[in-house]
Amino acid sequence: MTIDSLLVEEARRWIDERESALAEHPPRELWNEYAAGRLGEEEDRLQEHLVSCRRCSDLLLSLGRRERTVERAKAWLEAALESRKGTPERYLLAARAAAFVAEALPPGAAPPADLRDLQARAHAEVGNALRLLARFREAEAAFGTAMARAGADVAPETLAHLLNLSGSLAIDRRDFAEADQRLRLSVQLYERLGDRYRALDVFLRRGLVAANQENHELAIHHNCRVFDRLAPDRDARLAYISLYNSVCALMQIGAFEPAASLFEQGKPFFESHASEIEKVKIRWNEARAALGLGRFRQAEELFRKVRLDFERLELPCYVAYAGLDLAEICLREGRFVELRALAAEILGVFSSIGVQREALAALVFLEQAARRERVTLDLVRAAVREVEALEASGSLNGAAREGAEP
């Protein structure tokens, strides 16, 4: 029997044993996909993930399929952390596996404090995966379970970790005051622990909070503070995120000239540290900077390339989103036939995913105005603002936020 089939068989065994293994289990909704027998639909994704995390696969096999050990739970937790780089669905599957195994450990498998810490971290990864899927109510329940498992004597590093991840959930839920409080406490804990890198990592999220509150000057301050404390050659990923988010904030306050200059000067650095999706978003923001500077031909060429790239990455919402920027150019140049087609396409995409009423109303209004050739720049920009709010709330799944996130 192959590694893949053995591990899929084990996942199925968890379904059969869930009632006896979880005498005191977290909220049942955390396991509803398993309970509903839907794991079969996820088998291909499960296999693909486990092959990509060969070290975890080998460890799990070596432990024996029916052995419940701390090492097995830790291996699944490592697999979940590795899965953050992939799709949220695979991440959730691995995180749930980690939580399930941790909950199923027999008494005495580890010192009580260590066991609670392991369970708390596993449930926190479940919550974070659910956050990325915009399943916020379930994510909040998972983080509640994580805090309950951690207990009053939680280790400071675990508490800092939980505050960090739950702070990201608060950002996505648009509860910015709560987000900033959680993140501030997380930064302070990491600084007291002497963990400079993680403290700066969390501080970047405070920049995202400021940006989402439209306090772009404070966002620039937070991001520059992080960048100034980094060694770009050693902390390249954080340096990339802080610099990129600073450029995004400059564009939000209309400082297109310095933003375009930074994009041009920093292109080699950006390209070497950005993910595939982030590279497309960098080009998208280059196009927006060109548009802000009135370089319409350059902007249009970039917008069209960006839309093709989003289409290649199978992100239809972002194809439509970038179409709104292209619509502004069509309006400025009086190309109403193309504008009508774009408005109809954009409305069709966002209608199909059931977006919030305010955003849909703005897009319907834009489409109707386009059909009558009565579109104004204010109408286009109102639609852009509504879709930006959708992205910030997590409603456009499967891609990075407007600001990069560590």
Image (tube, grey):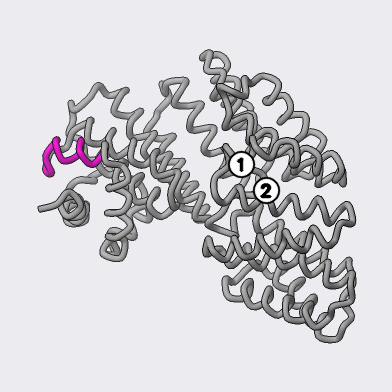
- Percent position (x, y) of residue 45? 33, 57
Q: Which residue is drawn at 86% across and 56% down?
A: 295
Provide the residue designation for mark 2.
Answer: 282
Which quadrant would residue 42 be assigned to in this image? bottom left
What segment carries the magenta color?
56-66
Q: Name the side, left or right, on which 215 lies relative to 239.
A: right
Disc number at residue 333?
Answer: none
The C terminus lies in which quarter of the figure? top right
Task: Inspect the magenta stretch and tell me whether residue 320 lies in it.
Answer: no
Do residues under tags 2 and 1 come within 8 Å of each other at their CB atoms?
Answer: yes
Q: What residue type is labelled 2?
A: Ile
Q: Residue at x 29, y 46 (%)?
A: 97
Q: Which residue is drawn at 44% across and 43% down?
A: 84
Can residue 19 be spotted in the picture?
A: no
Task: Inspect the magenta stretch and tell me whether residue 58 lies in it.
Answer: yes
- Percent position (x, y) of residue 321? 68, 64
**Image position of 253 with respect to 43: above or below:** above
- For numbered disc 1, what is the local secondary structure? helix
Front-most of residues 304 and 192: 304
- For numbered disc 2, what is the local secondary structure? helix
Provide the residue designation for mark 1.
Answer: 271
Front-most of residues 302 and 143: 302
- Percent position (x, y) of residue 308? 61, 65
Q: Name the side, left or right, on which 405 lies relative to 50.
A: right
Count of numbered tags? 2
